[in-house]
Amino acid sequence: MFPTESSWISGRRGAKEAISNIRAGVSADQIAARELSRYTQFGSLELGVEANQLAGNCDSGYSCAYTNTLSWRSATTPLPVENNPRAIFERLFGDVDGADADARRALLDSQQSILDYVTGSLAQLNRKLAVPDRAKLNEYTDAIRDIERRIQKAEAQNATMKLPVVERPNAVPEEYEDHVRLIMDLQALAFQADLSRVITLMMAREASNRPYRSIGISDGHHALTHHRDDADKIAKVARINEQHVKLFAYLLERLKATPDGGGNLLDHSLILYGSSLGDGNLHTHHDLPIVLVGGGAGQVKGNRHIVCPKETPLNNLLSSMLEKAGVPAEKFGDSTGKLDCFKI
């Protein structure tokens, strides 16, 4: 058995070596982010509800990096999720009390002044360095330029951005469902403001043993999935799955209720929902429960149940989604081409 979160949207199994020597594969969201980041402040957002540490041993000798995130910028660079709503808000809008345009403008002006000072100091320092040190400094300067690009993009968006008044969250909600909905609200807001066009959200980390007391289940989720055909445990897993789907529906309703262009955000999105295991009891990696939602700007026909041939890689669907988003659909992971069992 091996962790599957790292392979779900990358198609590459994580290497079981020293936990400090992690290796997986570039994930589909990061392939999209490379192309779409030129339009937004944030190339991608990685959101979650549970543990976000990437160090240490979390599953049978595998690094926590394989179980606590979906997103890999490179084969050796996992991206941690952010699970604190306040931190997500401050990343999107800055350390201000609300998504108020004047407050955002003042913060951007302050940030730009700091960057101007830093850039001038770097130019003076560069003239005094040896060639090898200049290379290192240039890498740092490139990072500064990316921050400047994001500030410039933010300034341009700030002039036209019209958002509802949103207060900065103060703490992580105690109830799981409230926590998920709050993060989904911020996700919808990020899409509405066009701050990012690529977002992943983990409603539960792999091997999570969270109880779901709000629906009367005190057993740990992971323990229940190893049900050994116990009918009572199977019924509880089904109720947890139903709860997750209801929360997913909350996000869809938020997007559907948000006008965008000639339609709404859901019309103009493609959202993949699912799991990296077909059967948690047996740890099977085929027949995955996958749902594709959203109109894809008129490119996708909905209300269908499609059964693809056995052994069809999920990455074939991801390649087709990338193509619909205007991203060069390069072959990645275990993909064998576009999804040909139906036209999306």
Image (cartoon, rainbow, N blue to C red):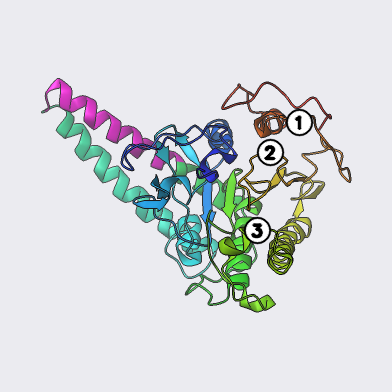
> Depth check: 218 or 183 in front?
218
Q: Secondary structure at mark 1?
A: loop
Sooner in the amino-acid sequence: mark 1 or mark 2: 2
Residue 113 on the magenta span: no
Label located before the other in sequence (3 or 2)? 3
- In the picture, the quarter occupied by the C terminus is top right
Q: Which mark is residue 286?
A: 2
Q: What residue sits 70% from the left and 43% below the top? A: 288
Task: Please tell me which residue is depicted at 59% across the width and 38% down the height of the picture.
Answer: 9
Camera-near label (1 vs 3) is 3
Instruction: From this view, report whether residue 293 is shown above or below residue 17.
Output: below
Predominant SS of the magenta segment: helix
Q: Assess whether mark 2 and mark 1 are in contact (beta carbons under 8 angstroms).
A: yes
Q: Quadrant of residue 121?
A: top left
Which residue, given by chain and number where applicable, does mark 1 sit on?
310
**Residue extent of the magenta highlight:** 129-149
Specify the amino acid type for callout 3: Arg
Residue at image position (55%, 38%) is: 7
Task: Give above or below for 28 relative to 182.
Answer: above
Helix, strand, or loop for circle 2?
loop
Is residue 146 one of those drawn in magenta? yes
**Disc ID at residue 13:** none
Marks 3 and 2: which is nearer the front? 3
Image coordinates for residue 227, horizontal then vertical, percent: 64, 61
The amino acid marked with disc number 1 is Lys
Residue under circle 3? 228
Category of crowding for the residue at label 3, using alpha-carbon neighbours closer than 10 angstroms: few (below 14), some (14–19), many (at least 20): few
Q: Residues within 10 Å of mark 2 (few under 14, many from 20)?
A: some
User: Residue at image x 53%, y 65%?
Assistant: 209
